């Protein structure tokens, strides 16, 4: 099955949008974004931002914040913008003050001290929160330009659990869509590999 860069645009019926996933095209040769799955938190005429969901770091939350007693939780590389700052997505908007709703049952921000307190009290499900260092950001029209050059594939979030610990989320999302997207999921990272 021939799926070239030109054909990716034919598969890409959707555009970037708040609440959608962006998947890197299969041969993207970028240390930050290769095989990345990005959850879009904002996309409008002024710019866009989101978090890379599938780039787990070799550091835990309790190592980043050693002065506070907190659980040993994975931290992900959210993107190259403000990569020394801690951010989080969660499904706890009903109990975390100052949370910002992104889409159905997905929130960002909120009272971090409250999150730590609830984690330590055992009343917060740590499978409903994901921590990131940095985020992926685009200035006005930058993402559209990358999209037009077939760097990304936009996909509506369906049954995917964006809080899962799956390091192969890129392949899973494409495989679950079937058809030509499933074929893309099996492309080698290096196109010269057969």
Image (cartoon, rainbow, N blue to C red):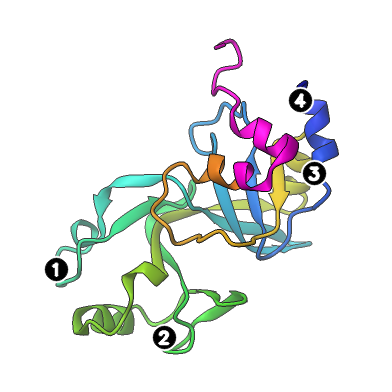
x and y percentages locating residue 185 in the rendered image = 60, 34
| Separation of residues labelled 3 and 2 (CA atoms) | 36 Å
* Pointer 1 with pointer 4, Cβ within 8 A: no
What is the spatial separation of the Cα atoms under label 2 and label 4, in whole angstroms?
Answer: 44 Å
Which corner quadrant of the image does residue 128 belong to?
A: bottom left
> Could one spot residue 126 in this view of the protein?
yes
Residue bearing mark 2? 96
Q: Residue, x 44% and y 62% (percent of image)?
A: 163
- Within 10 Å of disc 1 (Cα), the crowding (few <14, some 14-19, many 20+) is few
Which residue carries the number 1 mark?
67
Discs 2/4, front: 4
Q: Is residue 187 magenta?
A: yes
Sooner in the amino-acid sequence: mark 4 or mark 3? 4
Query: How far across and how far down the image is residue 191, in percent?
Result: 61, 16
Asked whether disc 4 touches disc 3, contact meaning CB atoms under 8 Å apart, the reply is no
Decide which of 27, 188 is in the foreground and name it.
188
| Mark 2, secondary structure of its residue | loop
Mark 3, Cα crowd under 10 Å, few <14 / some 14-19 / many 20+, is some
Which of the 4 quarters of the picture holds residue 181?
top right
In the rendered structure, the answer to whether residue 150 lies left or right of residue 126 reads right
Q: Secondary structure at mark 3?
A: loop
Q: Check disc 4 and report the residue beneath it.
A: 3
Tag 1 near tag 3, CB within 8 Å = no
Q: Distance of mark 1 from mark 3, alpha carbons?
A: 46 Å
In the rendered view of the protein, which quadrant contains the C terminus?
Answer: top right
Residue at point 83% right, 48% down?
13
Name the spot of residue 99 as percent of width and height, x first: 49, 82
Dot 1 or dot 2: first in sequence order is 1
């Amino acid at each position: 099955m021939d799926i070239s860069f030109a054909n990716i645009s034919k598969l890409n019926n959707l555009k970037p949008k708040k609440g959608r996933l962006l998947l890197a095209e299969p041969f993207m040769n970028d240390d930050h974004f290769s095989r990345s799955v990005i959850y879009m938190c904002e996309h409008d005429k002024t710019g866009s931002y989101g978090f890379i969901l599938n780039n787990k770091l070799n550091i835990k939350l309790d190592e980043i914040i050693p002065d506070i007693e907190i659980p040993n939780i994975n931290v992900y590389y959210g993107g190259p913008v403000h990569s020394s700052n801690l951010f989080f997505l969660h499904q706890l908007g009903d109990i975390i003050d100052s949370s910002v709703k992104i889409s159905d049952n997905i929130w960002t921000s909120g009272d971090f001290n409250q999150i730590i307190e609830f984690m330590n009290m055992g009343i917060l499900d740590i499978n409903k929160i994901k921590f990131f260092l940095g985020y992926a950001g685009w200035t006005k029209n930058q993402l559209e330009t990358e999209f037009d050059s077939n760097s990304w594939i936009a996909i509506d979030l369906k049954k995917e659990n964006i809080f899962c610990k799956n390091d192969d989320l890129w392949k899973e999302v494409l495989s679950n869509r079937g058809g030509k997207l499933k074929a893309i999921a099996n492309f080698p990272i290096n196109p010269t590999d057969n």
